[in-house]
Image (tube, rainbow, N blue to C red):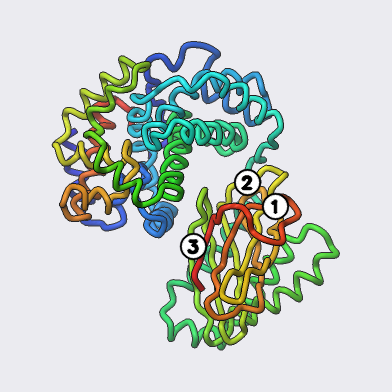
Amino acid sequence: MKLSEIAVRRNGAREPHTLAGAYVMDAISPPDRTRFERHLERCQECAGEVDGLREATARLAAATAASPPAGLKERVMAAAAMTRQQPPAAPAAESRTAVVPAWLRNMTMLTWPNRLALAGGALAVAMLALVVTFGVNNGSMQQQLDDDVASSQQIAAVLTARDAHMMTGQVLGGGTVDVVVSSSKDALVFTAKGLRPLPSSLGYELWLVGPSGTRPIEVLPPQSDGMISPVVASGLRNGDHLVLTAEPAGGSAHPDKPMMLNLIL
Amino acid sequence: MQAMRPAAPPPGQQAHGGDLAAQIVLVARGDIAAFDDVYDRISAHVFGTVRRVIRDPAQSEEVTQEVLLEVWRSASTFDAGRGSVMAWVSMLAHRRAVDRVRSVQKEAERERRIATSEIPFDEVAEAVESGLERERVRRCLGTLTELQRESVTLAYYGGYTYGQVASLLSVPQGTVKTRMRDALIRLRDCLGVAE
């Protein structure tokens, strides 16, 4: 007890670290959550502490235990029987998911003039290479290859645009999206990670919603690891929002499900 | 380093069917009978957690169903090296409950809830089916300072962010953040969670 109190005092000064308590109690805003999770990736000690504090929250939860209504079990068991399970993360897939988000994250950390300077030079080449690699890695079928390369060039055009800027949003229900917007190209590039898997009857659908109407962009391909490879949307207009919904598989013409993400572009 | 954390399972949660973590491994392989057993052992925990935050019975039931289905669906992501099954399940349940109140509930309803809610600490007593564990938690909450206890109960049971807790208690956000962490460290030690 004494020792941990000393530890608290010692670590209290380290800013992100103090979020551990709020984090395990889900008492933080989505940007704080993302920031702290990045911190956790680098800080083994913090990850260990978070695991320990989670056990304490489990006990807080246990103190509220109450039998669920009768009939719930039947419904859950029936739903489980019809629900495909998430496969375990393959080690190869893990290392791949690490590549692009880290790179996109690094972009946000660059200051504005730096990023412009870099984007005009060597980084542009590096980005194109990464995008192509990423597309190729994710396209399981050979016939997708050409499409991937073509869209990779579009992606690179947005990313290297002089007015490209980066936005991050949290998806309700889980997941983070990174969006790079270029007004001069009237286009954006969208990637996502950590999206909750949907039942096979549903698919994530992206929309542009604004004064000039609601336009579907794309039904995102299902990704077992919740990771969505870059998607380009062109035809961006003033005042558009980027919206994500879960629609019946195959997509809808109009979003009729609740918005899981609403990003003002 | 922090390796396996064999947290002492609270009484009443090791009644039958063998090790819960082993059952989750079976669930990950699609074993519906194992899931049936897991349901019996975690559903009250999930429902209690969710209902404590959401309050509305119908919504609580709906979210409980989602959480339990998520246990089925994502059993393969459970990592015993990171902690107990109950810690994992609590995280899924609490996060989803909090997401639900923050997304669906209108601001006005939230305000009313703040105005009419008693002090959450006292409401821990509402739970009727976890006597011994509830007593331990009450006792350990009692060892906290008032600010620590209020921070934890408002955040965990109330579903508020530390920023909201700070304004409810009229203290700086930084103070609330620190108190939350201090409080959980104390609770962890008091409840005998293995380090």
Q: Which residue is mark 3?
A: A169
Q: Earlier in the sequence, mark 1 or mark 3?
A: 3
Q: Tell which of B104 and B20 is nearer to you.
A: B104
Q: Residue furthest top?
A: B16
Residue at the (68%, 59%) spot, across then down: A220
The kind of residue on which mark 3 rests is Gly
Q: Earlier in the sequence, mark 2 or mark 3?
A: 3
Horizontal placement of A207 versus A24: left or right?
Answer: right
Q: Which residue is mark 2?
A: A197
Q: Earlier in the sequence, mark 1 or mark 2?
A: 2
Residue at the (28%, 32%) spot, across then down: B188
Q: Measured along the vertical axis of the image, is residue B82 above or below residue A42?
A: above
Marks 2/3 same chain: yes
Residue at the (46%, 33%) spot, across then down: B60
Residue B98: which quarter of the image? Answer: top left
Q: Residue furthest left?
A: B145
Question: Which chain letter matches label 1?
Answer: A
Image marks 1 and 2: residues in contact by CB distance under 8 Å: yes
Horizontal placement of A36 versus A119: left or right?
Answer: left
